[in-house]
Amino acid sequence: MLNSLSPDLITGGHCSFPLPSDPSCASVARSSLTIVMNELGLPSDLIDDGALAVSELATNQLLHAPGCIAELWTWIRTAPSPHLVVTVFDTARDVLPVRSDDYLLDEHGRGLAIVTALAASVGAHPSRARLQASPVTGKAVWFTLPLPQPWPGKSLRPNPLRARQQLLLALRSRGLPAKRVSDVPGTTTIHLDRLRIDITSDVFAWCTEDGLPIRYPLLDLQDAVEAIILQIDTSS
């Protein structure tokens, strides 16, 4: 049964929690994610996998970025299939994990084999804090877990005008001065630096600097925000 946190997650929202910069970070991350997954009504074995994996990420963050601001984020990704995305963010952007031999490696080369074994996918990218009063850059290390099928949110059709407003607020809260430029029948346009983002009835759409088209379903608002931040912060 879906409870208090779930409606926002299912319609493109996120749950974010501060993590302490002491050895309690793993237990705080574990308990916070467990609450979210329980409220989504997920099976106990998946909750156990998520709790163990996020403990590993939080412990790794404390070990290799001590004293940094840290946050736990989670949201739902619908494409190509429904997954729960779980991210540990910290402000040590200069040291990103890398992948090698199918494992996610921390900055000192020690494999987070437990996370890789439990998760459907893993990754890391530059990002910006969500919970700070002013914009703070850093890195996001994440994993995904498959959601049970059929997932109830998969068939939802978000309101494009509401999606536009959510995207504007999300970008501005992360220190990106996005501006709504136009509303024409069927499409809204947002400009951010040199980036033009079109919002149709179904997707957020833009192109990379190389002209590669990018598309995210409106329900995958959080993935779209992270992709936009990555493109802006790493563009030449």
Image: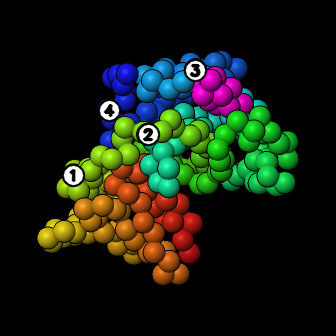
Label 1 CA crowd tier, 10 Å (few <14, some 14–19, many 20+): few
The residue sitting at 47% across, 54% down in the picture is 79
Q: In the rendered view, would you say 102 is above or below 199? A: above
Which residue: 72% across, 31% down?
56
- Mark 1 sits on what residue? 159
**In the displayed structure, would residue 209 be above or below residue 85?**
below
Pick the front one: 90 or 198? 198
- First along the sequence among labels 3 and 4: 4
Upstream in sequence: badge 4 or badge 1: 4
Q: Quadrant of the C terminus?
A: bottom right
Q: Which numbered tag is attached to residue 150?
A: 2
Q: Amino acid at mark 4?
A: Pro
Q: Earlier in the sequence, mark 3 or mark 2?
A: 3
Determine which of the numbered discs, if any, sits on residue 44 in the image. Answer: 3
Tell me residue 39's x, y (percent).
Answer: 43, 22
The amino acid type found where label 2 is placed reads Pro
The answer to whether residue 49 is magenta is yes
Circle 2 SS class: loop
| Dot label at residue 7 | 4
What kind of residue is marked 1? Answer: Asn
Foreground disc of the pair 3, 4: 3
The N terminus is located in which quarter?
top left
Q: CA distance from mark 3 to mark 4?
A: 20 Å
Q: Which residues are magenta?
A: 44-56
Characterize the local packing of mark 4: few (<14), some (14-19) or many (20 or more) Cα atoms within 10 angstroms.
some
Q: Amino acid at mark 3?
A: Ser
